[in-house]
Amino acid sequence: MSTPTPALDPKHAALLVMDFQQGIVQRMPDVDALLGRVRAAIADVREHGGTIGYVRVAFTEEDWAAIPDLAMFAYVGQNRLMHHEDPSTAIHEALAPEPGDIVVRKTRVGAMFTTDLDRQLRDRGIDTLVLAGLSTSGVVLSTVIEATDRDYKLYVLSDGTDDPDAETRDFLLGKVFPRRAQVIDTGTLRALLGP
């Protein structure tokens, strides 16, 4: 028996668009369709008065120096990759932020640990997050865990995520995320936002 999807109050919800930056997007298959679906979700949330938040991963010189040699991002630090001013770390132009949107820069996998995203969301009265991101096994997984620990109501857009490994993506969407979030598609999001 499936659990009914709870109502979504757009005034207290934010769509988080995570790691949709030039250098990551260009590595994904069928990216035009994915960008189109996420762009439509952004428009739907905006139309209903919801908040849009953007998360990108990028590093300053100080960030590179602080990465431990055995850390996941050690290669990034050692090779001085993903500099915060490099065009490859900019949010993809098809999903560009607008004035009033939340934009944060992270230096780890999850959206909250190295940012002030949680504070910015709480300051706006946000208690519900809708997640879209690249990749499902990276930023989406980490953020689902972080946001659950911070007591957010969660939705994951099944057609607003992608991963280099389709089998892992499907497993996470089908088995792991439903324990912590409602897994919906962009059409269901539109319906939950109301007329």
Image (cartoon, rainbow, N blue to C red):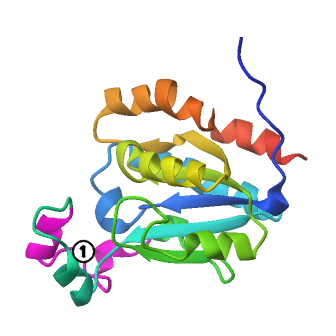
Residue 155 in view of the camera: yes
Image: 91 above or below 178 = below
| Within-10-Å neighbours for mark 1: few <14, some 14–19, many 20+ | many
Residue 92 in view of the camera: no
Q: Is residue 54 rendered magenta in the image?
A: no
Residue under the image location 77 percent in, 63 percent down? 50
Residue under the image location 29 percent in, 65 percent down? 23
| For residue 65, side relative to residue 172 (left or right) | left
Residue under the image location 35 percent in, 57 percent down? 25
Q: Position of residue 167 (x, y in %)?
A: 33, 26
| For residue 94, side relative to residue 31 (left or right) | right
Q: Position of residue 2 (x, y in %)?
A: 71, 17
Q: Is residue 77 rendered magenta in the image?
A: yes
Q: Determine which quarter of the picture holds residue 43.
A: bottom right
**Residue 63 versus residue 95: which sits nearer the camera?**
63
Identify the secondary structure beneath mark 1: loop
**Residue 81 versus residue 141: which sits nearer the camera?**
141
| For residue 68, side relative to residue 3 (left or right) | left
Q: Position of residue 195 (x, y in %)?
A: 91, 47
Image: 13 above or below 56 = above
**Residue 174 versus residue 142: which sits nearer the camera?**
142
Q: Residue furthest front?
A: 149
**Image label count:** 1
Residue under the image location 42 percent in, 59 percent down? 110
Q: Which residues are magenta?
A: 73-91
Q: Residue furthest top?
A: 1
- Residue that label 1 marks: 82
Rendered-image quadrant of the N terminus: top right
Image: 100 above or below 180 = below
Q: Residue furthest right?
A: 195
Q: Which amino acid type is marked by label 1?
A: Met
Q: Position of residue 68 (x, y in %)?
A: 16, 70
